Amino acid sequence: MTPISAVIITYNEETNIQRCLRSLCGVVDEIVVIDSFSTDATVSICEAHGARVVQHPFEGFGTQKQYGVSLAKHDMILAIDADEELSGDIRSFLFAIRQSKVAVPSAVSFLRWNFYCGKRMRYCLGNDYKVRMFDRKCANWTDNKVHEIVEVNDGVKVLKINTPLLHFTYGSEEEHERKVMKYAAVQHEEGCRANVLVAAVKAAFFFVRLFILKRGFLDGYLGFKVCSVGAKAVFRKWNG
């Protein structure tokens, strides 16, 4: 048997976390939640689902997730965000791994379906692959404050599977703009600097790439909103 530890970081995720936790039921051996002092019902919801909640000051997404991995009891880590949910196919895959019915991979990259305001985005927030399961002896999160990724050791093979991980990005347009502008401000503080012209060109290129080249216009009004808010955040990032 291969035990699995699920690791989640949270801050005021009461609207998302229950969906995430329910999808983990029966397919992981422990749930570790690193919470940065939520002021809503997040902690009580997590504890009601049997999670071990540890409070830890937030110093960046990468380091927060690294800390969670370090506290897990088991080496096989399932790294999932509070706004994500396991599909039935992933649950079956995890169950097979726990029962050692399939070869246990060192790292797994899941296909992620992105939802925005309840609608699946097929183009501007199209399908992407994310390494979300790994043996911590072979991989771990980078320490980026934002846009952190799982970095695997040299020579480690990543198993890519097409079973979807469901990602509910933002429940409203207002939430989207608030969060991406916050992330952009952090990146600007970390050293992203450019004059107004360069920042404007970067923002325009972002919009054209997402809305035209990646066919975000096929996602309709919500596609336009995703692209325009993203472009605004790019400008903020480079010329805050």
Image: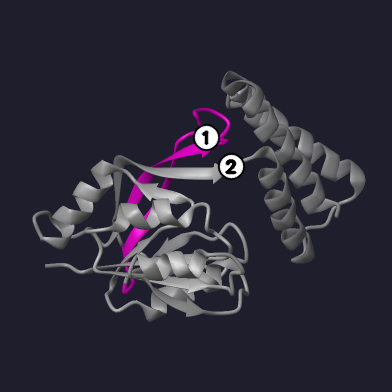
Q: Residues within 10 Å of mark 2 (few under 14, many from 20)?
A: some
Q: CA distance from mark 1 to mark 2?
A: 7 Å
Q: Which residue is mark 1?
A: 118
Q: Nearer the viewer, residue 235 or 28?
A: 28
The circle on residue 171 is 2
**Residue 236, percent across and down?**
81, 50
Q: Is residue 153 visible?
A: no
Q: Could you tell me which residue is drawn at 33 percent across and 70 percent down?
A: 50
> Helix or strand or loop: what does disc 1 sit on?
loop
- The quarter in which the C terminus is drawn is bottom right
- The quarter in which the N terminus is drawn is bottom left
Q: Are marks 1 and 2 in contact (CB under 8 Å)?
A: yes
Residue 237 left/right relative to 116: right
Q: What amino acid does circle 1 point to? A: Gly
Range drawn in magenta: 108-137
Q: Is residue 88 magenta?
A: no
Quadrant housing residue 127: top left
Q: Main secondary structure of the magenta part?
A: strand
The circle on residue 19 is none
Residue 78 left/right relative to 95: right
N-terminal of the two: label 1 or label 2? 1
Q: Could you tell me which residue is drawn at 90 percent across and 50 percent down?
A: 195
Q: Is residue 123 magenta?
A: yes
Q: Nearer the viewer, residue 131 or 15?
A: 15
Residue 115 left/right relative to 100: right
> Helix or strand or loop: what does disc 2 sit on?
loop
**Residue 20, percent across and down?**
40, 54
Q: Nearer the viewer, residue 59 or 55?
A: 55
Q: What amino acid does circle 2 point to? A: Gly
